[in-house]
């Protein structure tokens, strides 16, 4: 089996001389991201704690818009940043540590697209009606009473 | 790799075997299939966790207030530092694993041995850390009172640090005033013969109430998050009323039924997801140990390929990958 490695990350902006060097480079990158996450998590900058955009109102297209923009409309920017940074970390773990970067393109797509599609579907099913579940527990005339 | 496959003697024919679809060996592809299915399991758990948080969106515990402990630094408030350390350990052991795989490609037995050993050590440190984390979580911190409705009421007082008014938690041990009690333990000889009574809470709600009444400055904090993401602190009168009327059970620490941090689902998901992940780490360490001994015994040297290291490495990286998500959703979001 050939062991050719693609020795560049960030679309060729960071090139390495050997595979070992690339591994350490990726480690540095992952550590920096983790450090950023921890610092953001401890200090929680005020500007990131409230959504920047209120849900759109008025009819069908507003609802569709809210669904498409739901990560921005309903999620605190800080949490969105955490999730995006996590996906970035996951990408580099899979691509460089699990050397998906060196696999045949179709093999890589078979693994990644299957997982991404099914996970998106699962997350959509479970989280889509989250607002309704919240109202079952917390609305003024909630079906379930917790405070007694 | 050739030596891992039984030779059929018909390799040169198109249908005679010896072909590698997608240029990946059978074992590696099956490891990837397993990883994809296991990733779906974990994403199911994490999505269920996210779903359940919707029910308690306005009252979920704040991770920074729950996971504040670091070994050897007792009593200091250091949110997240320890989990960040655990994350780093796991990423680091992933790196030594990649280095082992790389050394395997160069058929360098001594380097594979060293890096596999370091990977196992990293896994062991992570498991130990997680055990400590669980122990601290189970043992609890300040204690709380649970209401009839299952809500958690915690105690604290306002103190001024550097000119800033902050709410400092007060532990139930410091608060409670022990009172003589008529409470008799249920034993097999004086009650239903086939059951024992479980562990009793440290204090009764009356003892906590007496302590609260005696300490003028102590207030009760409930689960509800205000618009700034802090828990609501009740007024003095409301504090006394809540404990008196709604207090049902004194809770310290966490188990699957109650926990002092907030909704019981919080501890349930914590135990379940980090536990399931920890189980994966444990099996990863065991697999690594088996492969390590095979390397030391020269099995792969004789086989002419270190692909087995690569396959177990894939699993090990997957464990790291899952932890990255667990870290985000339990400790950050």
Image: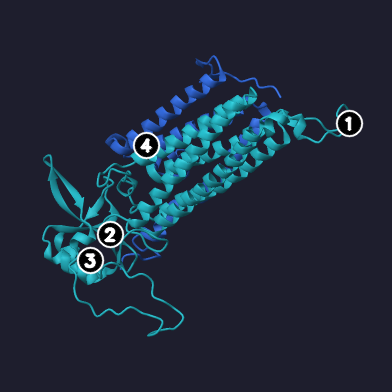
Chain colours: A blue, B cyan
Please say if the residues under marks 4 and 2 sit with CB atoms less than 8 Å apart.
no
Name the one closer to the observer, A8 or B291: B291
Q: Earlier in the sequence, mark 3 or mark 2?
A: 2
Q: Which residue is mark 4?
A: A77
Q: Which residue is mark 2?
A: B143
Please say if the residues under marks 3 and 4 sit with CB atoms less than 8 Å apart.
no
Secondary structure type for disc 3: helix
Q: Where does residue A34 sit, x and y in percent of width and height?
A: 40, 32
Please say if the residues under marks 4 and 1 sit with CB atoms less than 8 Å apart.
no
Name the image quarter holding the N terminus of chain B.
Answer: top right
Label 4 crowd (10 A; few <14 / some 14-19 / many >=20): some
Image-quadrant location for residue B260: bottom left
Label 3 crowd (10 A; few <14 / some 14-19 / many >=20): some
Secondary structure type for disc 2: loop
Please say if the residues under marks 3 and 1 sit with CB atoms less than 8 Å apart.
no
Q: Where does residue B56 sit, x and y in percent of width and height?
A: 38, 55
Q: CA distance from mark 3 to mark 1?
A: 81 Å
Secondary structure type for disc 4: helix
Image disc number at residue B10: 1
Q: Earlier in the sequence, mark 3 or mark 1?
A: 1
């Amino acid at each position: 089996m050939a062991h050719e490695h693609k020795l560049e990350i960030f679309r060729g902006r960071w090139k390495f001389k050997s595979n070992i060097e690339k591994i350490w480079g990726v480690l540095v990158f992952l550590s920096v991201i983790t450090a950023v996450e921890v610092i953001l998590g401890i200090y929680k900058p005020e500007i990131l704690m409230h959504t920047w955009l209120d849900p759109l109102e008025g009819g069908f297209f507003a609802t569709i818009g809210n669904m498409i923009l739901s990560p921005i409309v309903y999620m605190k920017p800080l949490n969105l940043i955490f999730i995006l940074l996590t996906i970035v970390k996951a990408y580099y773990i899979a691509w460089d540590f699990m050397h998906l970067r060196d696999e045949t393109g179709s093999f890589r797509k078979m693994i990644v697209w299957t997982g991404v599609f099914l996970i998106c579907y699962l997350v959509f099913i479970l989280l889509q009606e989250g607002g309704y579940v919240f109202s079952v527990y917390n609305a003024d005339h909630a079906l379930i009473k917790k405070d007694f | 790799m050739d030596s891992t496959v039984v030779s059929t003697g018909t390799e040169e024919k198109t249908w005679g075997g010896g072909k590698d679809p997608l240029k990946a060996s059978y074992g590696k592809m099956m490891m990837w299939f397993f990883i994809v299915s296991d990733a779906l399991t974990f994403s199911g758990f994490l999505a269920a966790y996210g779903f359940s948080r919707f029910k308690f969106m306005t009252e979920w515990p704040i991770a920074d207030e729950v996971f504040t402990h670091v070994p050897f630094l007792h009593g200091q408030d250091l949110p997240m530092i320890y989990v960040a350390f655990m994350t780093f350990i796991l990423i680091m052991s992933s790196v030594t694993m990649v280095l082992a795989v790389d050394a395997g490609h160069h058929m360098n037995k001594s380097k594979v041995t060293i890096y596999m050993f370091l990977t196992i050590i990293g896994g062991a440190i992570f498991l130990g850390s997680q055990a400590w984390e669980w122990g601290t979580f189970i043992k609890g911190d300040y204690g709380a009172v649970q209401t009839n409705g299952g809500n958690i009421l915690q105690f604290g007082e306002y103190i001024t640090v550097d000119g800033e008014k902050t709410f400092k938690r007060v532990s139930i041990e410091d608060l409670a005033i022990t009172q003589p009690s008529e409470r008799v333990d249920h034993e097999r000889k004086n009650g239903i013969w086939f059951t024992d009574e479980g562990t009793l809470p440290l204090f009764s709600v009356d003892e906590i109430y007496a302590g609260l009444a005696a300490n003028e400055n102590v207030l009760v904090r409930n689960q509800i998050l205000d618009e700034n993401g802090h828990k609501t602190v009740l007024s003095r009168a409301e504090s006394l009323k809540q404990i008196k009327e709604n207090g049902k059970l004194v809770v310290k620490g966490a188990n699957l039924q109650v926990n002092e941090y907030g909704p019981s689902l919080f501890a349930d998901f914590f135990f379940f997801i980090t536990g399931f992940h920890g189980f994966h780490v444990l099996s990863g360490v065991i697999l690594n140990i088996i492969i390590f001994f095979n390397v030391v015994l020269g099995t792969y040297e004789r086989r002419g390929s270190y692909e087995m290291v690569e396959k177990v490495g894939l699993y090990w990286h997957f464990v790291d990958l899952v932890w990255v998500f667990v870290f985000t959703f339990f400790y950050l979001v």
